[in-house]
Amino acid sequence: MKAALSLFAFCMLLPAQKDPAFEAYKAWDADHPETDFNARAQSLFEVSAEWVTKWPDSEFAWHQRRNSLLYTHSHSPELWKQVSENLIRLNPPHTVASGAAYDWVAADVNLKDAEALVYSEIQWHDAQAPPTRPQNPTLADLIDEANFAANIFPALRTLASAQIKLKEFDGAHATITRIRRWLDSDFKRYFDQDPLGAFPDYEAHYFTLSAELAGAEGKRADALAFYQKVITNPYYRREYRGRVKETHALWNELGGTDEGWEVFSEVPALPAGVPAGYLGMPFRSWLALDYKLPEMNLPGLDSRTWTNKDLEDKATVVYLWASWCAPCRPHLPEIQALYNQIKDRRDVQIVTLSVDEDREKLAAFMKEKGFTFPVMVSKPYVEKLLPHVKPGQHWIVDGNGSIRLQRTSSNDGGRQQAFIDEALYKLGQVSQMSRSGK
């Protein structure tokens, strides 16, 4: 459990290096090696109150304060409002407000304030003109276009939850209807539709919100029908299982028998070849693209030069990273493990693309860590594709040299086999795309 409390600090390592709150966190972390999660959470709750008082302009301190409220399951309206308002104050406009509203709704506090806050964010989003795709778009243009369309979903989900809790049923129906329209339009346009990533974090929310609304309106049979769509979907149940207990309770309330429940709740097996993953670690969705990589002539760490020909006739995972990128580092052993498994295959491969500028430091880092996966080194090449470079991206490139899938970060909890299984599965899908000419 200590690792769970330390993860955010690790990801914030570089920007927080000169922050006194970060130094205080490191000292606290060293002094609290206990594995009792509740004891650590209570200690963080107490000490983070001192940090935000002493360093009120430290975003890191306020994030730790937020973490402490999460870990102690706080339902204090005042504390949640204090944390959220300060995070909003310390961040650019329209970046964290929807997340703050989500925190309030999840904690069941400040519901009217949360509704107003997230509604204003939706209005702001609706007033923005979508990004205009240039004639020759960069990879960044395509990602920005998709992200703009996707940004509305979490805000709508939070608004619907708030409206249900506030018993504003007409508004909740309208919001959930808009979620359905989004799933049938922009979601299908921009996202890979593989239910491995699409169902748990997107469509399942539509059915869950529909069930919660029906239950709040007293339409228990309708709620049961919506919940069944969730709990009997093998892609969802494998990841969460969270709705089974309450659905079973509702089944019993409506007079269902144990024999009937076994039939009602039966879950079909996953299709052959689909990775099972790990409970509580859903695979994240991929953006669906078709972006032809421009000419490559990229030096490796050794004497090799990489060109587009090196990507022909095989599916390739490309991981964009840097040795100085703290959030990238926990993932590198997984990259190495995948490379070890497929390095002798001719149909698939993994290569990495580093934006390091100091090749000697990069080589020393690779040697120190014992990494042997291939590295292409070219910050200028990446900046042509992504003017605002964000390391930690995965691309899956088809045999014609086009990026077909893109995702920033993974969600495998450090479990190497989960990453490897999913990577091989997606490589197989992209290989099939190439063979079928899609």
Image: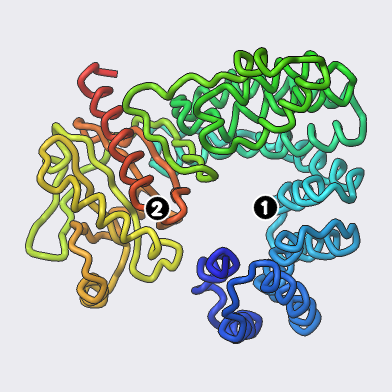
Whichever of callouts 1 and 2 sits on the residue coming sooner in the sequence is 1
Q: CA distance from mark 1 to mark 2?
A: 30 Å
Residue 356 lies, in percent from the top left, at 31, 67
Does 437 appear above or below 293?
above
Crowdedness near tag 2: few (<14), some (14–19) or many (≥20) residues, C-alpha within 10 Å? some
Residue 417 lies, in percent from the top left, at 34, 48
Crowdedness near tag 1: few (<14), some (14–19) or many (≥20) residues, C-alpha within 10 Å? few
Residue 175 lies, in percent from the top left, at 78, 26
Does 173 appear above or below 105?
above
The structure residue drawn at horizontal position 57% and vertical position 25%, both measured from the top left corner, is 186
Q: Which residue is mark 1?
A: 95
Residue type at mark 2 is Arg
Looking at the image, residue 183 sits to the left or right of residue 403; the answer is right
Q: Which residue is mark 2?
A: 415
Does 58 appear above or below 262?
below
Rendering quarter of residue 325 = bottom left
Disc 1 on helix, strand or loop? Answer: loop
The structure residue drawn at horizontal position 73% and vertical position 69%, both measured from the top left corner, is 65
